[in-house]
Amino acid sequence: MNAAVIVAAGRGARMGLERNKVLYPLCGEPVIVRTARAFSESGLFDGGIVAVTGACDLDEMKRMLEEAGLAVRAVVEGGADRQESVYRGILACDPAADIIAIHDGARPLVTRGVIERTIESAKAHGSGVASVPLKDTVKRVDASGCVVETPRRDDLRAVQTPQTFDAALIRKAHERFRAGGADGQRATDDAMLAEWMGHTVHLTDGDVENIKLTTPEDMLLAGQVLIRRGEAKKEETTMRIGHGYDVHRLVEGRRLILCGVEIPHTVGLLGHSDADVAYHALMDALLGAAAMGDIGRHFPDNDMQYKDADSGKLLDHVVALLREKGYVVGNVDVTIIAQKPKLKDYIEAMRENIAAHLRIDLDCVNVKATTTEKLGFEGECLGISAHAVACIERA
Ligand code: MG
């Protein structure tokens, strides 16, 4: 009897997300649903599928799997680290299972062939771990980053999941590890635990497309793979555009902050938050592109929690909202209209700030400043305004 443990207890830190990355949509469907479906539809798991996730995501994941019509044996709460989460998943498996496949929830592109090869190997040898040859040459380095040696590429493999094992073997490996059998070493995958037991781990052919979704670019790549496989429709227009505009009054006794850069000046911008007029225009452009209203709706200016708020933090929140809707930012262009002070020397720092918050290349961010030839409120130094346009794409 074959059982599967799908581990999805991690946060989306490297993805720039505020919650578990497997709950986000990939071509209109949550990543975890796509991963669980690959296992369910393979027809290889008569012992059922156990999903493991963080306590705060349990209910949402259960609901998503249910709505997708995917019957799983259990959705259980993960532990402090990956090993603890996997162990809890193993405990929730059917005790009668003699084969257990362990898989990353963030690898939705796994195919039946990849899964089946690991199972066959586990039946024959006790283990079957999906792997691919390396494309890049690998260097071992010392603490200062200098090359110590270059291992022969032919002797190296990049290891993926599923990692499938004889159930008794992997249970014992986890229990031994928990009992301190690894001398404090940290395991980055389950095969290591089996290795530490003295088991010779067998590798099977994985798939270069069986990528772990780690960065926003991985989402775009995965989308392309799904379209090619016919598992997602190519949208006619994947690009959306939004515009934002904002004005703040210049007054004495306030700081002047534009795109997160504090600029020395005799006056500053008045507002409920830090009054970063350029970030406000940018946020409105991003929200506009996603048809999600404006910042007034998301961060009301009568709400005390936004009093003197760092607009960079609000911008992070807007980016997370977009990601939740399945969008990534393509490029942005911000224009600041101010008679004084001269902004030329601060433009690069502004671009860098924006690129960091949006997690896009510097090359995709433009900031420019202009005066109004002393015309209008900007020209009379009564206030500063900003326009922004943003292009977003479906991940
Ligand atoms: Mg504003």
Image (cartoon, helix red, strand yellow):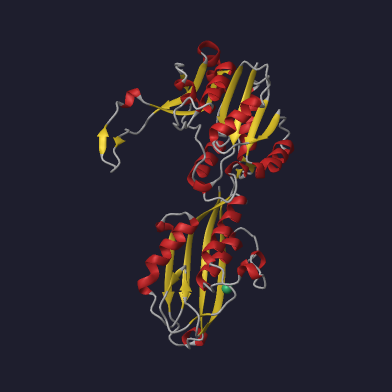
Percent across and percent down for residue 24 are 61, 45
Q: Residue at x 52, y 73 (%)?
A: 277
Left or right? Give the position of 49 relative to 389: right
Left or right? Give the position of 290 relative to 340: right
Percent across and percent down for residue 239 are 55, 54
Q: Image quadrant for the N terminus?
A: top right
Q: Nearer the viewer, residue 293 or 242?
A: 293
The residue at the far top in this view is 124
Percent across and percent down for residue 300 are 66, 69
Left or right? Give the position of 51 relative to 378: right
Q: Is residue 230 visible?
A: no
Q: Is residue 183 visible?
A: yes
Q: Residue at x 49, y 57 (%)?
A: 358
Q: Nearer the viewer, residue 225 or 354?
A: 354
Decide: is 91 above or below 227. above
Percent across and percent down for residue 29 are 64, 41
